[in-house]
Image (spheres, helix red, strand yellow):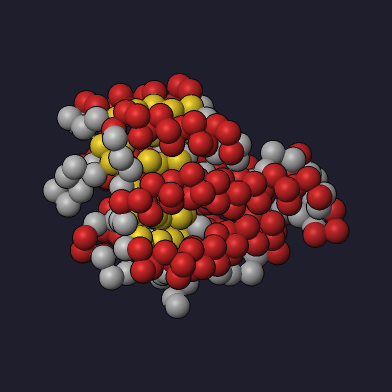
Amino acid sequence: MKLEGKIAIVAGGGQGIGLGIVRCLAEEGADVAVLDINKDTTKKVADEIKALGRKSLAVVADATDSKQVNQVVQDVIDTFGKIDILVNVVGGIGKTTWTRDSLRFIDQKEVEWDETFALNLKSHVLMCLAVVPHFLKQKSGKIVNISSIGGKLPAPRNMIYGAAKAAVIHFTKSLAMELAEQNINVNCICPGVIWTPLWERGTAYYIRLTPEGKGLKPREYFDKFLVSGVPQKREQTPEDMGRAVAFLVSEDAKNITGQSLNVDGGRVMD
């Protein structure tokens, strides 16, 4: 196992992509602190990891709140004695956007930008601000931020989300450059199309607001308009992201930093 003896925090590990990452890290031998805002799912995932024979800690917190984030990191240090890996998965669409009845830019509200950037960028920044000092002391550490191919492709219908995810990519590169000499690797995963609770809600939103979605169920819309655009003609899975993360935080990737890896079936090739 590549991660035996390593301690990881997965922020946003309670479901979807985060759950797949938690599972893959544990399968490679890591003990995992699962941070999520949902108490029930957080405990459930932590219990699953314990059943695999690994140590786990369920921590319920809002990753966009610096006080809560700092307390979580201290709790992990107190429990495990150290942190080796930080994976930032928290993200999504701000709650106000779901209530909008238009996909046009001119109908967007300021609060939507604030909410979505807080989820996708601020959460990553706050987690790094809390964890990086520990990495600097031990002169080692691995950080993986979860962005999206939406941060690399123009997406008028999803402009706010795409801009936030593009910011995550830039943040990753800049932080990687600053920390490189301290033996701290910072990389980014850009997932493609994955059937998660976020995508299920998103497809229902598009069905409501677009003529092509009329009469379709969320999964039907997902297959017809999203999976069909993948060159490999198949969707990706949370475990696909988990395996990529497990590689990037292992010693096999010790000379890889500042990269944004597309795990998307060939949707974006750069």
> Closer to the camera, 181 or 154?
181
Q: Quadrant of residue 198?
A: top right
> Image height check: is 213 above or below 149?
above
Residue visible at 78% across and 45% down? 111
What is the x, y in percent for residue 254?
26, 65
What is the x, y in percent for residue 166?
58, 64
The answer to whether any part of residue 135 appears in the image is yes
Q: Is residue 257 left or right of residue 94?
A: left
Q: Quadrant of residue 99?
A: top right
Q: Quadrant of residue 185?
A: bottom left
Residue visible at 32% across and 28% down? 79
Residue projecting furthest to the bottom: 270
What is the x, y in percent for residue 19?
38, 39
Q: What is the count of numbered marks?
A: 0
Q: Is residue 161 left or right of residue 46?
A: right
Residue visible at 39% across and 23% down? 43
What is the x, y in percent for residue 9?
38, 41
Residue projecting furthest to the right: 106
Residue visible at 26% across and 37% down? 31
> Image height check: is 224 above or below 101?
below
> Closer to the camera, 111 or 105?
111
Residue projecting furthest to the front: 137
The answer to whether any part of residue 89 appears in the image is no
Quadrant (top left, top right, bottom left, bottom right) of the C terminus: bottom left
> Image height check: is 28 above or below 50?
below
Q: Is residue 259 left or right of residue 47?
A: right
> Closer to the camera, 10 or 99?
10
